[in-house]
Amino acid sequence: MLKGRLYSICISPERGQLKKEVIQANVIKDYVIENDGHAGPWGRQVTCLNLDSVLKANQLHGLNAGPGDFAENLLIEGINLTNIGIGGQLKIGSKVILEVTQIGKEDHPSVVTRTFGVSLLPSEGLFCRVIEGGLIKKGDPVQVIYLF
């Protein structure tokens, strides 16, 4: 089983903004991470990104980007997220389950691209819907419970 750790949790009140890190968050079933602007009954409620991707972008592009700077909700350490297909599931902490609905997205001149000159979500982001909600905290275990 693929296991990792929740490196950071980030939210922003509206779409199209860089996100700010929080220590813990309430994840609401089939809705969103509480206080994040991606709320609603759709397939992109939570975005996940691999910590290694951020570190690599920092090195390649001379950046100092950190949690939330690539507009991700969850930065995950220790799991290669590219191995998880659409329909795959991640369990975070003891209760929260996310299902991958989309990998990558259309690229557009986003706040991330304007700020850093590079964006990761269009090519590497996992977009998920919340199957089971609950409280998550920085450092929680993350495991792939279903590969698709």
Image (tube, rainbow, N blue to C red):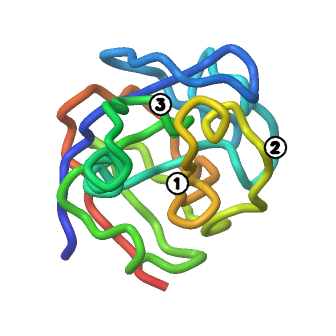
Horizontal side, residue 7 vs residue 32: left or right? left
Name the residue located 75 percent from the left edge and 58 percent from the top edge: 107
Alpha carbon of mark 2 to alpha carbon of mark 1: how far? 24 Å
Identified at 72% across, 33% down, the residue is 38
Assess whether mark 1 and mark 3 are in contact (beta carbons under 8 angstroms): no
Query: Along the polypeptide, which appears first: circle 3 or circle 1?
Result: 3
Sequence-wise, the earlier of marks 2 and 1 is: 2
Q: Which mark is residue 120?
A: 1
Label 2 environment density (alpha carbons within 10 Å; few <14, some 14–19, many ≥20):
few
The amino acid sitting under disc 3 is Asp
Badge nearest the viewer, 3 or 2? 3
Between residues 97 and 77, which one lies in front from this camera angle? 77
Neighbor class of circle 3 (other Cα within 10 Å; few <14, some 14-19, many 20+) is many
| Horizontal arrangement in the rendering, residue 92 relative to residue 106 (left or right) | left
Q: Is residue 42 left or right of residue 74?
A: right
Q: Residue 102, how many percent across, how many down?
A: 66, 67
In the rendered structure, find residue 69 and report the number of the disc placed on it.
3
- Of 15 and 53, the residue lying toward us: 53
**Given the image, on which type of amino acid does mark 1 rest?**
Leu
Disc number placed over residue 41 in the picture, else none: 2
Q: Tell me the distance, in whole angstroms, between the alpha carbons under discs 3 and 2.
A: 25 Å
Q: Residues within 10 Å of mark 1 (few under 14, many from 20)?
A: many
Q: Secondary structure at mark 2?
A: loop
- Asked if disc 3 and disc 2 are in contact, CB closer than 8 Å, the reply is no
Name which of mark 3 and mark 2 comes first in the sequence: 2
The residue type indicated by label 2 comes to Pro
Image point (70%, 50%), residue name: 44
Is 57 situated above or below 70? below
Q: What residue is shown at x 53% (from left), y 36% (from top)? A: 116
User: Is disc 1 placed on a helix, strand or loop?
Assistant: loop
Quarter of the image that includes the N terminus: bottom left
